[in-house]
Image (cartoon, coloured by chain):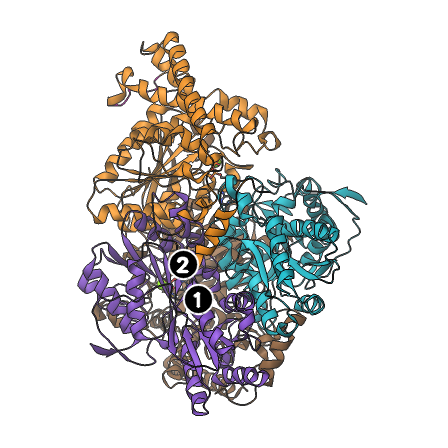
Chain colours: A orange, B brown, C purple, D cyan
Amino acid sequence: MPRSVELAPRSRRALKAGASRECVARFEVHCTRFLDADGRPVAELPEPARDARSLVPLYRAMLLTRQFDQRAVTLQRTGRLGTYPSSYGQEAAEVAIGAAMARDDVLLGTYRETGAMLVRGVEMHEILAYWGGDERGMAYAGPNAPRQDFPISVPIATHAPHAVGVAYAFKLRKEPRVAVCVVGDGGTSKGDFYEALNAAGVWQLPVLFVVVNNQWAISVPRDLQSRAPTLAQKAIGAGIDGEQVDGNDAIAVYHTVSQALLSCRRGGGPRLIEALTYRLSDHTTADDARRYRSELEVERARSLDPVPRLRAYLEREGAWSDADEQALLAEQARLVDEAVEKYLSAPPPKPGAMFEHLFATLPPALEAQREAVEAEEGEPS
Amino acid sequence: MPRSVELAPRSRRALKAGASRECVARFEVHCTRFLDADGRPVAELPEPARDARSLVPLYRAMLLTRQFDQRAVTLQRTGRLGTYPSSYGQEAAEVAIGAAMARDDVLLGTYRETGAMLVRGVEMHEILAYWGGDERGMAYAGPNAPRQDFPISVPIATHAPHAVGVAYAFKLRKEPRVAVCVVGDGGTSKGDFYEALNAAGVWQLPVLFVVVNNQWAISVPRDLQSRAPTLAQKAIGAGIDGEQVDGNDAIAVYHTVSQALLSCRRGGGPRLIEALTYRLSDHTTADDARRYRSELEVERARSLDPVPRLRAYLEREGAWSDADEQALLAEQARLVDEAVEKYLSAPPPKPGAMFEHLFATLPPALEAQREAVEAEEGEPS
Amino acid sequence: MSEITLVEAVNLALAHELAADPRVLVLGEDVGVNGGVFRATAGLLERFGKERVIDTPLAEGLIAGMSVGLAAQGMRPVAEIQFMGFLYPALDQLINHASRLRNRTRGRLSCPLVLRTPCGAGIHAPEHHSESTETLLAHIPGLRVVVPSSPARAYGLLLAAIRDPDPVVFLEPTRLYRLGKENVRDDGEALPLDACFVLRDGADVTLVTWGAAVHETLAVADSLAEEGIGAEVIDVATIAPLDMQTILESVEKTGRCVIVHEAARNVGVGAEIAARLADEGLLTLQAPVKRVTGYDTVVPLAKLEQRYIPQPHRIEAAVRELLEAA
Amino acid sequence: MSEITLVEAVNLALAHELAADPRVLVLGEDVGVNGGVFRATAGLLERFGKERVIDTPLAEGLIAGMSVGLAAQGMRPVAEIQFMGFLYPALDQLINHASRLRNRTRGRLSCPLVLRTPCGAGIHAPEHHSESTETLLAHIPGLRVVVPSSPARAYGLLLAAIRDPDPVVFLEPTRLYRLGKENVRDDGEALPLDACFVLRDGADVTLVTWGAAVHETLAVADSLAEEGIGAEVIDVATIAPLDMQTILESVEKTGRCVIVHEAARNVGVGAEIAARLADEGLLTLQAPVKRVTGYDTVVPLAKLEQRYIPQPHRIEAAVRELLEAA
Ligand SMILES: Cc1ncc(C[n+]2csc(CCOP(=O)(O)OP(=O)(O)O)c2C)c(N)n1
Ligand SMILES: Cc1ncc(C[n+]2csc(CCOP(=O)(O)OP(=O)(O)O)c2C)c(N)n1
Ligand SMILES: [Mg+2]
Ligand SMILES: [Mg+2]
């Protein structure tokens, strides 16, 4: 994590007499990992993870995310869902972020946070509704819904300043809550991301920025996004702490995010975590990744898949078995079936719905238009 | 200047096995100064500055900037000029930037680059015309005009991406030229600045970013602009080199900018320099700085004034005398007089001028409007 | 009750709401210690503290974006953009988020923010400081756009804007900030949004306008009155959504309409009003609908700005043309 | 000469200009290796190299801003914004710089850039991918805004846009990208900017439209023709600056006008056309000027987008209303 190894002199002091060239600030970036690619610990595990059974819920959520994701892709391929962005390969990062958060923290994410959303209590049928072209998917109306979470942010990094506002409200009201803002590697190139990081630093707000670096922004590789060797160091310009974590190591992500959240919650100011992972799928169902990356690269990344990695660890520790796996797969398939059924059988939105939530109360000036669209019955021609 | 003391591992490599927490990147920021506040060298001077007489042109330009500036403020106070942003106290940084640049480099600056503009060949009467409310001020029509320099950029930091485009053209055409983009400390908070820095890093473009940190953005102090202890470290997130310089030490600025330009010109990629200075004047003639900063602070900063500092050095070295000073003041006062005269006696723009350069050729759709405004004779009511 | 300027009325409304509602915050560049470059927020920091009167880093996208976050959390942010020419980096947040947060979440979240910004030419300001680009806001579904034209309306409409449960852009004509004073009672009474103000009755021609142009328009109406010509003057005030009812009723009576605004003519908000007249009001029109506006060019710097701003003689000429046409 | 789609025509025009003029560059997100998310730039990287076909970091403000810098240096940047919903961060650069660089420097510098972006609904795209906010551009003095409605016009108008010495925003309706094919000769012949295209003659009513809506409008004109009703169909093509001459002449002949566009109605570009008719064309109007447009609400997601897009039956109903009024 970047930090001043020695007290960095404030700029005005640098005007004092001194040598012709002196070092005025130093920074470091660290990376954390606990499991290697085969799920073997590379160091002593952090406290809560020492009992492997405590990790089973994480694993279950990762598997559910993957199963849901596969089904969503299938629905799209068979014409029953719109464009869908798979999070295949990123389940560890997504689920661990969601799991480490407190219920009343607020998540502000991109379109690829399915894992975190599910863990937070967004319903599968709602996620399907959204990608199926129905605004009701972002209503988060389920019983365990994170009602204050932000809806998916499609315009890249535009939700980063929202996180600053959310966290400002928390701080002002003295609530021990954290705004968790997730962006992709591509998102780090956008001014909004930087402006938010910088402002969160100024006010020392409880915001955790997580950069899910899956190495690609559609066809643009990480190296064309920035010359910076790490994305964690984007924090340095904002004067805040940034660090890397192996994003395919669920234990490392869970631990690092938990620690950062604790620090944010205790008034330690904002933090930035770069989670290193890889998008094993196409960018979305509308993309063909073979156009811009080699099968070899994907093959290599596949060997780092976070799901078998955690499973190997759990099995070795005796906390998981093949029978457990089969039972869970069947159970989750049923849950996904039910969600798909609920999605497919939902009545379509009424035309008038497009005016329903434009304002708290529709201004008289727009009544005629609402009536016109409501009057149009039957199928659109 | 921030740089990797050891090779920073690229992010993808960080996925390899390793310790549970390892340092993956280190950075440092340095600050350069040659003269102390009394104009005494604190270290051996760089080559071209060793002969003090070679510094006289810098000093002359600094003094001209100051005299011109004072006159502009007077013109405003007497109702003969619009709002004007003084650069009082920042003359060393401004003049040294302009002087270090090659003629065919391109300057992209803010409204406070008067010193650099004068050195680059913009005419005093043009600068007055601009602040007097006449677009012709940005025509740069003088014989030594830097015709490709960008006009003053009032919207903060919006010219930073322009510099990327200019430098891209230089690189593409294999021209050994540099785009020099000057922003204030306030400007470093804006997304445009960061986006430009980042992109210049990706393409390793010949752009020199200079942050003239005068400690204030109107009433907002440097500390409320960013938690970062230096603004030079904003470069780290873009993976480029950044450093600080004492911006009230003309020799240090000239040297640091020259070195950076050389590096840019030779294909070394973009650079960032933070010049530490202080705005001794109000933000503009429309501002009253006493509302937000103490006389004590200004007093302290006045003792670091760059003009007497360089003069003290020159006098001590026998390169300047009181007589020289008096002669120069008189000579420059005359030049400023002439410019003011030229400005005040210029015929006002014709109403039709507002359509003259809207397009290369005015579209027929706008002819009627041009005729209407041209037809309005005499004083506007 | 005291005689105050428009900028003082803005200040009064802000102070009133800050005192009345703990959810209200003021944020922007130089709004704190400095009290705003036009002094619209003067004294607020001292009274309400720096947690609620916030000097932000220099980033308009951030200001708008964090206001969205604050509003979604139930706060009532009142953000200042220092000049309308610096509003453009905030448009993305206004269009993609503020205006549709309620719609996107089917009412689960909402966005009760106010974004204030000084607009218009006429004060000899530097480049980019004289914009009247309200079209860019008025066209966006889900945004309210309000322009006051007097101290009392500034006070009452700003209160209404802050209390409104949806986002409002509040445009303050710099030319009016200190143009005149008016008695304003600090009684916390809001004025209605979404409704025109009929400032003057008349039977011969309807003059529709808003913001600073209200003043030249009223001056013309006064001078026409001396000749016995009755000009009805309508201050649109909330330019989106548009209260066409009031305008249509007036034109039904007068049969003639001149629309006056400082913004460029092409696709100005005046176009919408004229278009509605060409549809719903066509049969009542006795003469062409005229627009007297800024020209379709960049607002010129100080030396020519008065040539750009619609002057009374241009308004008057348009009225006379209509009267002769009839 | 071959049968190609609109997106292929765009590709052809880009390739033609890249080959013909070394100053031309293509830049944007995913325009290189990937050939653009709609394949508009497919094959260009391979032919012209990565110095001239540039994959940029993800930052629309940067894309527009660096295009200004390139253009000022005499290059001819053709930038792509991936969808119109992501254009908003670039508006500041378009408004404060691109549109006025020539004016600000009295012609010393200029800004011959083209900014292409896919627009409109109708392809079941995700949120923020279906915008038609051309008003925000058309209102800006100094910008040209062009919308092609067929492969041949896409080819010819894009050539013209690239060769134009001033900034042009080029809006490509995604709904038309692959809707149909047309014979397009790759002869480097540009079509005129600043001029409407009269696609169909008719004496009874004038239908004014642009972009994707041209197709529904032509369909309606066809079906009306079967009943002996002559609808003149005008494709505005360059929506700013506006060629009102052609429209006024047509309405002089027909006396009736329906304007059709996908953008929201309020302060849409259709309002400007109607306003001009209410002024210069009033005496020729035999019936109210109707607008058939998108509604004044956020463009709905896929399930309702067809309800938002002006459908033929709505256009036809408006025409019939006018004919009955007469
Ligand atoms: C402002 C903006 N520009 C462009 C797009 C189109 N787009 C969608 S996803 C994407 C790439 C994002 O990459 P990254 O941030 O790395 O996230 P990832 O998709 O890899 O999760 C782009 C360019 C967008 N959604 N928003
Ligand atoms: C985008 C934008 N926002 C706001 C302003 C108003 N403004 C003019 S100067 C200034 C402060 C700039 O501070 P800094 O960048 O430090 O430059 P300095 O004036 O100190 O030279 C502000 C906020 C502006 N010109 N542009
Ligand atoms: Mg990515
Ligand atoms: Mg400053």
Rounded to the nearest whole Å, what is the CA distance between mark 2 and mark 1?
Answer: 10 Å
Residue A301 falls left or right of residue A138: right
Label 2 Cα neighbours within 10 Å, binned few <14 / some 14-19 / many ≥20: few
Chain of the residue that carries numbered disc 2 in the rendered image? A
- Is A372 drawn above or below residue B36 in the view shown? above
The amino acid marked with disc number 2 is Pro
Is disc 2 in the same subunit as disc 1? no
Q: Single out the residue that lies furthest toward the right.
A: D1
Q: Which residue is mark 1?
A: C245
In the image, is B104 to the left or to the right of C41?
Answer: right
**Residue B199: x percent and y percent?**
51, 48
Residue A111 found in image quarter = top left
What x and y, as percent, mark residue D33?
Answer: 62, 38
User: Magenta region's main secondary structure?
Assistant: loop
Give the letter of the chain under mark 1.
C
Element under label 2?
A: helix
Coordinates of residue C1 in the picture (x, y in percent): 20, 76
Q: Is residue A152 above or below residue C251?
A: above
Secondary structure, mark 1, is helix
Name the residue that disc number 2 marks: A364
Task: Residue at 73% x, 63% y: name it.
Answer: D203
Residue B219 appears in the figure:
no
The answer to which quarter of the image holds residue A248 is: top left
Residue A166 is left or right of residue D99, and the answer is: left
Q: State whether residue C93 is above or below residue D124.
A: below
Residue type for callout 1:
Gln
Q: Is D262 contained in the magenta span? A: no
Residue B238 at what x, y percent from top left?
45, 46
Query: Can you tell me whether the CB of the residue at mark 1 lies under 8 Å from the nearest atom of ligand 2?
Result: no
Where does the magenta region start and end? A41-47
Circles 2 and 1, Cβ within 8 Å, touching? The answer is: yes
Identified at 26% across, 16% down, the residue is: A51
